[in-house]
Amino acid sequence: MKTLIKNGKLITASETFQADILIEDEKISRIGLGLKADSAQVVDASGKLILPGGVDPHTHFDLPMFDTVSSDDHYTGHKAAAFGGTTTAMDFASFDFDTMKESVDAWMKKAEKAAIDYSFHMNFNKFNDKIAKEIPSLRDMGITTLKVFTAYNGRLRLDDSSIFKTLQITKDNGMLVMVHCENGDVIDVLVPQALAAGHMSPEWHALTRPAWGAVDATLKMASMSAQADAPVYIVHMNVGGEVDMLRYARERGVKVMGETCPQYLFFTIDDLRRPDGAKWICSPPMRTEKDNARIWEGLHDGTFQTIGTDHCPFFFDGTKPIIYEGKPVKIPGKELGKDDFTKIPNGLPAVGDRLPILWTYGVRAGKITANQFVAYTSTNPAKIMGLYPRKGALLPGSDADIVIWDPEKRVKYGVTYSHHRTDYNLFEGWNVIGMPEKVFLRGKLIVDGDEWLGKSGQGQFLKRNEGEVL
Ligand code: URP
Ligand code: ZN
Ligand code: ZN
């Protein structure tokens, strides 16, 4: 089967140019001006932009948390991603079983309903000699990334020597350590103190997870990266000081890379002080306008490498159903912590919002260029995670994951456009200019305007190679 997309303007991480694209079966076969293909179905993209499908390096679908589970699974979350122009998602598999193989198998089972292509990172929250020996087997499964935590003491956190040994092993095996940076010890002192003083409201989630803890953990991990000479990728960076640490280390040749997420560009601790502040609860928390501004600056000047989402949605009021694909659905959510911020499930919806919001409030607002937008949301994650040039590229031979982007489409954004399986959207009522018009996954049209043409089970597991250090 052949599809010819004509007259569009291609935007890649480094170039913008007019060209046609020929898709044959699942791949891009040719790119050039005036292409012809007799038997091809022709799509006229005059006035439209052509982008490589988004690659989201950071999602949490179907993740058990407290007494509930994140409300998007590997089908509903993938569908929302696709409507927002993302065609590859990388989720974090929990290390719930004795072996990593069993833990990955459990995530594979959950992902059988996948609607876009996907891969996993392994949450790495325990370490001993036996587990250390198992790390290279992950690479053989096509999973080349581990996430370690400097917080969530007693649950997910690893001590420094285990993190350092992990870095030595991943370095020797062409793998990458991702890190959640906060100071778990300080958090563990502040949270019980806040509760004992009767501070139960959502803002205390942020006040008990101080920004300085994220800064010190980021510097520590940059320093570990230097000492082990191993690459490190800091996830969900949220504080201006972290950007300074990233820049400091990168200027000295340290192989440390940084990801931020839309929520840390637009929201602050003041949002947690609203009556519906629980909607903004995630870890690490929202900070200040100064932090937002410093993160934008880091995107503008190229200190950062990627923008993921950390999509981990919960209902705001999980006692009331929403209608999803014609059926009522309710899943316990943020109301679990209405009297105690420590019981509010951590996480928020974002996977479908990433491209439309960043286009309008990043590219159109002049904060990043269209090429940076593609680099941060597609090409760089694909390169770092070992998927390039299969994903993240508009090149002959790449998977035909293509977004035809309407740069003039104007909408009042919110739940009706984001398609997340939850009852709220953080960007409700925001004016958005620029949305996906058509989305192709490996040559197959899966989103056509408002219409969903995709299906559960069509997403493929992507075995990954060693990634690049950017
Ligand atoms: O609140 C969040 N971000 N939940 C997901 C877990 C994590 O640390 O990324
Ligand atoms: Zn994290
Ligand atoms: Zn996360």
Image: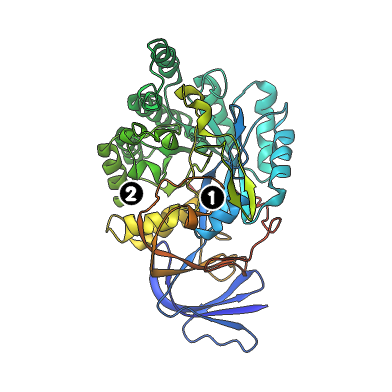
Percent of width and height locating residue 452: 60, 64
Q: How is the image coloured?
A: rainbow
Amino acid type shown at disc 1: His
Calculate the distance from the C-alpha at mark 2 to the C-alpha at mark 1: 26 Å
- The residue tagged 1 is 420
In this orientation, does residue 438 appear? yes
Residue 270 against residue 212 in the figure, above or below = below
Disc 1 is placed on an element classified as loop
Q: Residue at x 47, y 78 (%)?
A: 45
Q: Is residue 14 left or right of residue 399?
A: left
Q: Position of residue 178 (x, y in %)?
A: 51, 36
Q: Nearer the viewer, residue 132 or 370?
A: 370
Secondary structure type for disc 2: helix
Query: Is 41 rendered above or below residue 301?
Result: below
Q: Residues within 10 Å of mark 1 (few under 14, many from 20)?
A: many
Residue denoted by label 2: 299
The answer to whether the residue labelled 2 contacts the one labelled 1, judged by CB atoms less than 8 Å apart, is no
Q: Would you say 359 lies left or right of 147 here?
A: left
Label 2 neighbourhood size at 10 Å, few (<14), some (14-19), many (20+)? many
Q: How many badges with numbers are in the image?
A: 2
* Relative to 389, residue 315 above or below: above
55 displayed left or right of 69: left
Among numbered discs 2 and 1, the one appearing first in the sequence: 2
Please name the residue shown 37% across and 37% down the image: 238
